[in-house]
Image (tube, rainbow, N blue to C red):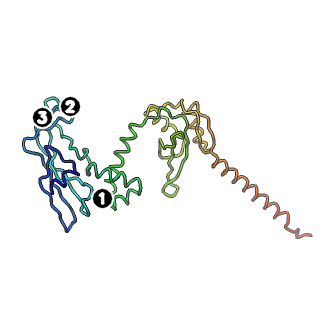
Amino acid sequence: MEKTLEIPLNVKEPWYIKEYKFDSLSENLDIRLDFKRGSKFPCPRCGKPDCSAYDTKEKVLRHINYFQYATYLHFRVPRVKCSNCGILQIRVPWAREQSHFTLQMEAMILKLAKRMPVLQVGNLLGEHDTRIWRVINHYVSEARFKEDFSDVDEIGLDETSCKKGHRYITLVVDIKNSKVIFVCEGKDSSTITGFSEDLQNHSGNPSNVKSVCCDMSPSFINGISKELPNAEITFDKFHVMKSMNEGVNEVRIQERKKIRNSKIPNSYG
Ligand SMILES: [Zn+2]
């Protein structure tokens, strides 16, 4: 049975499965991993091989379910003494530091979070949604850190509200790649300043932006003229038509009033 568990967990020397226990009452599977006595590990910073374990710290991580059993890995993670770097905790192959989950469980969480609200992911897995958010925030930040906006020259801006219209967020879309590249709270001109700074932090250049498509918000127009000096603004068709329809409707209401007033009989004959 240990072998059956070792293969999907990718447990390799010097690690091994020491024991496992099914608890039919709680429907948990607890797997105890350990490393062989006297094992050596590479330094997690400089890679120096064959560092001895200095001490260990107990850890419990949630893994993907084994059949209906919520699976937990229990192990002691060693700190090693490196002659170059001092005392450091090693990286285990099945999890990243600071996580409550194994890498396979984190991959499952990200897949689910693409398809359903985070609260539902938490309910489905029996985990508090703050833990789910921590995983999502980690990988989104990591992926966003690597983003390269050097070829962004055509963007779309729009704002939307959340929490029944009390909070606004502004979204910036890279039109050529059909991709949201910046989101922030608010809908004033400072949102364009925030976008300009973020663009520069990802190898982009605000002067490269030649075209911006947005609604007729004076805040956006001010922000664009200040932060994106070479951008031409195109008002998007939806907002132009909306504005035109509102204008036509207003004229129609006024004309109806006029017609109605002209038909009121003069009581003095
Ligand atoms: Zn080292």
User: Are the residues at dot 2 and dot 1 in contact (C-beta closer than 8 Å)?
Assistant: no
The CB of the residue at mark 3 lies under 8 Å from ligand 1: no
149 over 266 or under it: above or below: above
The CB of the residue at mark 1 lies under 8 Å from ligand 1: no
Residue, disc 3: 50
Q: Amino acid at mark 1?
A: Glu
In space, the residues marked 2 and 3 are separated at their CA atoms by 12 Å
Q: Position of residue 204 (x, y in %)?
A: 47, 32
149 over 106 or under it: above or below: above
- Ligand 1 position by quadrant: top left
Residue depicted at 63% across the width and 49% down the height? 238
Q: Position of residue 171 (x, y in %)?
A: 51, 45
Label 2: which secondary element: loop
Which numbered tag is attached to residue 46?
Answer: 2
Label 1: which secondary element: loop
The CB of the residue at mark 2 lies under 8 Å from ligand 1: yes
Binning the other alpha carbons within 10 Å of mark 2 as few (below 14), some (14 to 19) or many (20 upward) gives: few
Label 3: which secondary element: loop
Q: Amino acid at mark 3?
A: Asp
The residue sitting at the right extreme is 269
The residue sitting at the left extreme is 38
User: Are the residues at dot 3 and dot 1 in contact (C-beta closer than 8 Å)?
Assistant: no
Binning the other alpha carbons within 10 Å of mark 3 as few (below 14), some (14 to 19) or many (20 upward) gives: some
In space, the residues marked 3 and 1 are separated at their CA atoms by 38 Å
Q: Position of residue 225 (x, y in %)?
A: 59, 34
* Labels 2, 1: front one: 2
Residue, disc 1: 127
265 relative position to 22: left or right? right
Depth check: 126 or 110 in front? 110
Determine the image quadrant of residue 62: bottom left
